Amino acid sequence: MKKITLIIILLSGLIVFNSCDNDVDINASYQDIVIVYGLLDPLDNGIYLKINKAFLGPDNAYTMAQIPDSSQFLELLDVRLYDDNDPPNEYVFDTITVADKEEGIFYNPYQQLYYNPLIPSVETKYTLRIFYKDMEITSETNTIEEFNYSDITKPGFAKAIGYKEDLIYPITWFRKDQAPRYDITIRFHFKEMWEGQTDTVFRYFDWFKDTKKAVSGEEVETFYSGGTFYSFLDAYVAYDDEETESKVLSRYFGNVEYIIDAAGIELNTYMEVTEPSSSIVQVRPQYT
């Protein structure tokens, strides 16, 4: 009997040591991670904040992204913005629902945003505070100094502009201390008269875009080719649909806008961290 008992024990030992669990749980324990997107623009009609929560679960991530509850807070958050006055002014945000969210990985077209009608002041420091459960999420940024028409020195304000196909033209503007990044757009406006209609059709297209970064010097400069303008005229004025194009009786030149968007230090840092890298080194620091 002792021999039989010993054999049973050995077999049992073999079974135990050769049995293992191959299931691996790649999902970490749930954590409350708040993600906030916002932009302070003195030319906008208020401040919009997108406040989401990070999500992780056993289901397909693309499927979960289509469910609003996966990333959208069900409860109302306490969201407040403060300026740098003494004492500071307090601006409380409330939720609104917009219906213009484009199709993509996440749910659409409805989304919840936090909104306050405040028009941010220039050259002002703002502090954002969000209270959720026992957490306080904070962020701060400075708005840049005012950007005027006179800051664009070339081609200059309200001056006649000509485009010669074989020439290169400069755009020059004064650099702002709190704005290390600039997006430049040239927008051409024109109008059309259609057969059978008394109303004028107004159209435009952007025919030049560039980005410049500058942290020193008095002015920033970029260049464009006059030939590019005529190439865009050929490509974007006429309608692709022949029937629609046949209804156009005449077209007239309109204005040309030189648009310069200036990004503050924090926005520029975020864009540099998240933009595509041209380096073989793809390790990026986390932005917060």
Image (spheres, rainbow, N blue to C red):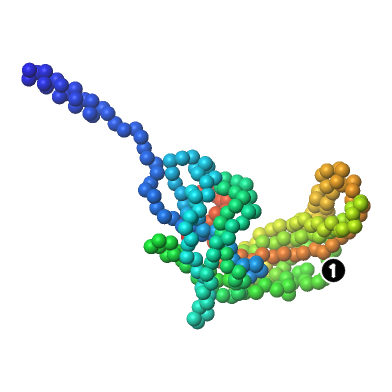
Where is residue 218, by image quadrant? bottom right
Left or right placement of residue 242 versus residue 73 in this view: right
Q: Which residue is mark 1?
A: 160
Q: Observer-nearest residue: 205 or 279? A: 205
| Residue type, label 1 | Ala
Percent coordinates x, y for residue 125 in the rendering: 53, 73
Q: Residue at x 86, y 43 (%)?
A: 242
Percent coordinates x, y for residue 80 in the rendering: 50, 69
**Residue pushed farthest left?**
2
Q: Observer-nearest residue: 111 or 42? A: 111
Percent coordinates x, y for residue 118 in the rendering: 60, 71
Q: Residue at x 82, y 71 (%)?
A: 159
SS state under label 1:
loop
Q: Residue at x 82, y 58 (%)?
A: 202
Left or right placement of residue 187 versus residue 65 in this view: right
Please determine whether, in this image, residue 233 is positioned above or below residue 153.
above
Where is residue 22, by image quadrant? top left
Where is residue 262, by image quadrant? bottom right
